[in-house]
Image: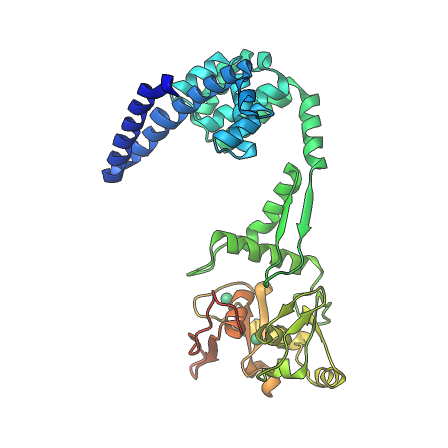
Amino acid sequence: MAASGAPVTRLKAAVDEWAAWIRRAEGEALAEGLIQTREAGIDPLEAAFATGVRRFDKSGEYRADGALSLTAWLRWKCKLSGGAAMERVEIARQLEKLPQTEAALASGDVGFQHVAILARTAEHVGAAAVRKDEASLLQSARTLDPGQFVTVAKNFEHRVDAASALAEANRAYERRYFHISEPKDGLVRVDGALDAEGGAILRSALQPFMRPITDDRRSYGQRGADALVELGRRGSGNRRDGAGPRPQLIIRASLDTLAGTTGAPAGELGGGGTVPAETVQRHACDSAISRMTGAAELEHELNRAVRTLSASTRRALEARDTHCVFPGCSRPLNWCDGHHLVWWTRGGQTALPNLALLCRPHHRMVHEEGWMIERTKDRHWKASAPVRQVPANARSA
Ligand SMILES: [Zn+2]
Ligand SMILES: [Zn+2]
């Protein structure tokens, strides 16, 4: 530590001075400041870090601290994640064999992520092959963002060594998985990894359902989650006209829950987990995708009540409303449920005057968040915000 004392003091002073300047910079100066933070700061420092890591690797001195590997030492002492530590070791080892790349990183000419991609390519096809095309690869790195540059690097790998590119694709395919957890605190965790082809198929299938609606308050992540569920809903053969439902969701609920009686139990999902009464009522509203089961009295009640839209009623409803009727929303028919303005549990009829097309996010806002939707005398639709605030961030009692 003593040996690095003076340079470290100067480095810290320079970083402090830079940080103070960035805090004050505005407009164009701030934009240029951000660029220079990486070009003159982070990237050359990563290059210096790589040089140091390489020398440390060769000396084996990390063992003096009791670490079993250089990667373990980097995680421990340099506070890196396992992936970040492995990436830096790989870069350090490959950069030695790629002098042009090392120089481009040190001068801030290409970014750290570009170099990480080149290092991985060198590990796959050998540094010698990369060296032959190093100048043109770096030229691409200068003009493309890292995401685009991966494609260039992968194409290069395929040209140089189709067999190992195939082997890599097969390894990636072997690592695919998808997992859906049991519900916990009302949330089901979903995680997984797909090979490139599977990922592309899923991405393009989700895309049409991801588009924001007018005044969309949902985050990108929330839109993604909605799109995935919508995909599942369509995938299981649900017919758009709402007639002849094929239930995908089985909810067991008591009549009290359906009627919204105080003290009623929650609805139980067929696959495990519970949903609040409001959700049970929303599904009961247009049961094209759900089947409700319960006590004998409930079965009787459900059979008696015609709450599922017949094909002809659905067609008439579609002809009248043409899309979600929530003011400002234009989600098309296949996003929409038939909502009972006076809920059928309260005696509302499954007939055109008592129905409205609502897209699923808006249908949910009406049932679970307390919004009101009504048809005015001049045949317009009016939405009113909930009188009783349903807190979005608090657990319901
Ligand atoms: Zn409804
Ligand atoms: Zn809508």
The residue that appears at 68% across and 74% down in the rendered structure is 311
Task: State the residue lying farthest toward the bottom.
Answer: 347
Residue 277 lies, in percent from the top left, at 60, 76
Q: Quadrant of residue 70?
A: top right
Render colour scheme: rainbow
The foreground one among 191 and 233 is: 191
Residue 57 lies, in percent from the top left, at 54, 17
The answer to whether residue 237 is left or right of residue 43 is right
Q: Is residue 4 above or below residue 287?
A: above
The residue that appears at 48% across and 56% down in the rendered structure is 212
- Quarter that holds the N terminus: top left
The residue that appears at 54% across and 20% down in the rendered structure is 64
Residue 267 lies, in percent from the top left, at 65, 74
The foreground one among 155 and 100 is: 100
Q: Quadrant of residue 128?
A: top right
- Quarter that holds the C terminus: bottom right
Count up the numbered dots: 0
Task: State the residue lying farthest toward the right.
Answer: 296
Residue 350 appears in the picture as rendered? no
Residue 355 appears in the picture as rendered? yes
The answer to whether residue 335 is left or right of residue 40 is right
The answer to whether residue 201 is left or right of residue 222 is right
Q: Is residue 321 above or below residue 344?
A: above
Residue 29 lies, in percent from the top left, at 25, 34
Q: Quadrant of residue 139?
A: top left
The answer to whether residue 32 is left or right of residue 94 is left
Please state the quadrant of the image where ligand 1 appears: bottom right
